Image (tube, helix red, strand yellow):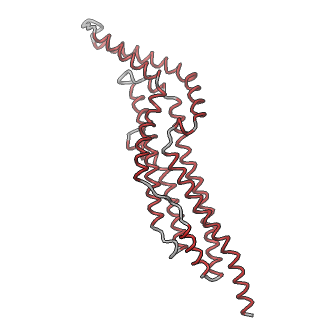
Amino acid sequence: MDYVFEQIEERVKDSLIPLLMEMLRGMFDSVNTEVGNAATCAATDPSAFNPTVLNVIKSVSDNAIMPIAGMVLTFVACYELIQMIMNYNNLANFESWFIFRWIIKTFVAVELITHVWDFALAVFDLTGVVISEGGIVISGSTAVDASALAEMESTIEAMSMWGVMLMFIQVLFINIFTFILAKIIFVIVQVRMIEIYLHISVAPIPFSTLGNKEQGVMGQSYIRGLFALGFQGFLILICIGIYAAMIRTLTFSEDIIGSIWGVLGYTILLAYSLFKTETIAKTALNAH
């Protein structure tokens, strides 16, 4: 009778182990894939991410936002001229140079909104260089190699049927939760790119205010926001570097269950950290 039960246990264990290993491979692969995509997306500038979307936004912005920016620029230029006249006691203390200064400032303001997309995208080219240089230093894959998986399989084969079943239930839960976290990481990174497109779509309006010290606060805050979105990619890279270093400290061959729960915990921390990168970048650059 004991022999029969032993055979049943052996067959159940033999059927569970391949399913268990398949779930483990899928769990590690899904997380590693999304983390790798997040690092790639963080280093990609808006023009290379989706040129079609960028062209659509640029067309809409040129036709809908640029006329408004022109009116704002006209108002700001007139306001600046009135301020200059008042500062010179209604031209009682007239000096011809201030007219030339106003012409130069207006010319610069016109050039800014004329080439606003070049300036906006140049911000992400600059931050992209920083991210690329950081990526060289912050390297390391979060994937679990084949040798570690082979050691895990050997350890699992030495366990009893009930131990394998208990591990199967835990890995099934962790696998589902990790898959959800991987998609959350994907959404967080993609939302950043959407925010970049939305941000640069209205670029002509804040840029048109830069010709005046008082009204230019809007444009200055906007430019800080652009740099914050750019450097958010660098913070994403930092988070991924920390996550990869933490994953490499786990010993999958010695404590499989503890290590798998550790992967889940680190993935939760990664998703939360990526969510906070926007706030940290804006705080660092005072872009509120």
In the image, residue 1 sits, relative to residue 66, either above or below, namely: below
Q: Position of residue 263 (x, y in %)?
A: 52, 65
Quadrant of the snapshot with the C terminus: top left
Query: For the view shown, which residue lies furthest in the front direction?
Result: 147
Residue pictured at 57% horizontal, 57% vertical: 181
In the image, residue 64 sits, relative to residue 87, either above or below, namely: below
Q: Position of residue 167 (x, y in %)?
A: 61, 74
Q: Position of residue 56 (x, y in %)?
A: 60, 30
**Residue nearest the observer in this picture, 179 or 225:** 179
Q: Is residue 224 left or right of residue 3?
A: left
Residue pictured at 40% horizontal, 52% vertical: 137
Query: For the view shown, which residue lies furthest in the left direction?
Result: 93
In the image, residue 170 sits, relative to residue 96, either above or below, namely: below
Query: For the view shown, which residue lies furthest in the bottom direction?
Result: 1
Quadrant of the snapshot with the N terminus: bottom right
Q: How many marks?
A: 0
Residue pictured at 50% horizontal, 42% vertical: 44
Q: Position of residue 40 (x, y in %)?
A: 51, 47
Q: Quadrant of residue 224?
A: top left
**Residue nearest the observer in this picture, 266 or 128:** 128
Residue pictured at 60% horizontal, 53% vertical: 183
In the image, residue 159 sits, relative to residue 248, either above or below, namely: below
